[in-house]
Image (cartoon, rainbow, N blue to C red):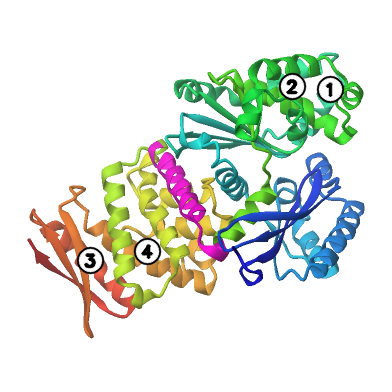
Amino acid sequence: MATKKDIQTVAAIDVGSNYIRMSIAEIDSEGRINILEELIKPTNIGKDTFTTGRISAETIHDTCDILKKFSQLIRDYRIKDYRAVTTSAMREAENREYILEQFRIKTGITVEIINSAQERFLTYKALRSYAQDYKLINSQSTLIINITSGGVEVSIYDEGSLKFTEYIKLGSLRLRETLSGLETMTIDFPNAMEEYIESKIYLLKAVIKNMHIKNFIGLGGEINRIFSRYKDSRSSETGKVFVDRKIVNELHRKMSSMSDEKIMGTYDVSKKEAEILLPSIILFHSFIKMTEAAGISVPMISLRHGLLVDMADEFYDTKGRKDALNDIISSVWYIAEKYGIYRKHASFVEELALSIFDQTWKLHRLEEKERLYLQVAAILHDAGNYVSFSEHEVHSYSIIKLCNIMGFSNSELNLIANIARYHAYDIPLHSHTNYTTLGSREKVTVSMLSAILKLAESLDVSHSQKIRKIEVDINQDNAVFILHAVKDTLLEEWDFRNNAEFFEEVMGIRPITKHKG
């Protein structure tokens, strides 16, 4: 049994587009989470951004008032660790930087803008944690649709691994604001909205249908409130809500003929909730039609749950931490396949790069986080060949920087893109804009990791995977790379020597090769 010392009291805050929510919870040494208190307050952040592109002064003042009360509660609970995040509406607001500064100064709460990939990562962390008892994502092919105010996240798991992930700017609130002008021009607005949605997701139909999806998981905000009313026998068996496909179809049919006022009265929701229920139902209906699922499983999780699970993983290094890393790498391989990367070569370079990183740790002293950056860069280093074989490394940089890789912030993606940018002949120079915009520490990180990646790439320059394993023996004068190979490695060792100077410059020791059959 966990003692009081083993328990951490933490807070998770989601400054959302429609609501500002806070969960206060206890986390024990096994990573178990016990919710103590939850708060929710409405906000117009999303309405402001999606309508005008800016958040109004009135909304800023109202948000600060809410966060002040949250801050007081954090003090009352004597919480030392909290995490506050904000998503699409704040990301897209033109005045976001000084709004966040006002939050910090006036309330004492530092709010972090996360991108859609980080949001998806946290939500799926919660899903893995909360869904373990009914193992949905560990069985048959599973489609996960997460409808947020700003977008729809579409993912497919198969045999417990993430096979596919995409983000589309079709969130429930965004749809209402985008199509607000159209709403006044037609008496059949739901049908017009459905046509608009279909035009944006049609490219996904073939992918989803070819996967023969049997399980469908629905996530996202206000829809939980409606779906929680509709349960069948499977709901009690799993402890989660299961909504039969027929009910989804019936909800779609009914809501498509209702005004917002009628939805408010029928389902006992506020006007704000009613406005986004219709697009949410249409989106779920559009996706379930592409599957063979009997209905939608609704685990009733949220971004806040993901924040709490993430904190638990950080505090206690739980099994969920490893599962989350596996999800990241699975999603990266999906991107690699999309860009036609030669898997055998990329996988071999990935293995070599990580081996070099681990065996030369005392030269670079980088952490697990940087090791992950190197791993992703190694997998995607040849993505630029999709654009052109000429200067493909430059194109790899551009592709990776714009990728929506689950779990990484925009600044982290920029680091990974820079590491891949220098896997070939170029070295980082201050005449390169992509390099000069990095901070001092980031420049060092990029240089160290790209030096490692260069050597890993050299050791498979023939794309023939000649080397069975490498051992690195570091002495006072050199880092001796002992190559265990069954074939002639003349070409690999020649290319290795070409990149040895940069490694020595960055790490302070000369790498040399020694062949061992």
From the viewer's perspective, is residue 337 above or below residue 443? above
Which of the labelled discs sits on residue 263, or is there none?
Answer: none
For the point 70% across and 65% down, the residue is 9
Disc 1 marks a residue whose amino acid type is Glu
Element on which disc 4 rests = helix
Element on which disc 2 rests = helix
| Residue that mark 3 sits on | 498
Element on which disc 1 rests = helix
In the image, residue 336 lies in the stretch drawn in magenta:
yes
Mark in the foreground, 3 or 2: 2
| Residue that mark 2 sits on | 193
From the viewer's perspective, is residue 15 above or below residue 78? above
Label 2 – label 1 distance at C-alpha: 9 Å
> How many residues crowd around disc 3 within 10 Å: few (fewer than 14), some, or many (20 or more)?
some
Which of the labelled discs sits on residue 450, or is there none?
Answer: 4
Q: Position of residue 198 (x, y in %)?
A: 64, 21
Mark in the foreground, 4 or 2: 2
In the image, residue 423 lies in the stretch drawn in magenta:
no
Q: Nearer the viewer, residue 459 or 273?
A: 273
Quarter of image, res 368: bottom left
Q: Position of residue 307 (x, y in %)?
A: 65, 54
From the viewer's perspective, is residue 516 above or below residue 404? below
Which of the labelled discs sits on residue 183, or is there none?
Answer: 1
Q: Decide which of tag 3 and tag 2 comes sooner along the chain.
A: 2
Q: Which residues are magenta?
A: 314-337
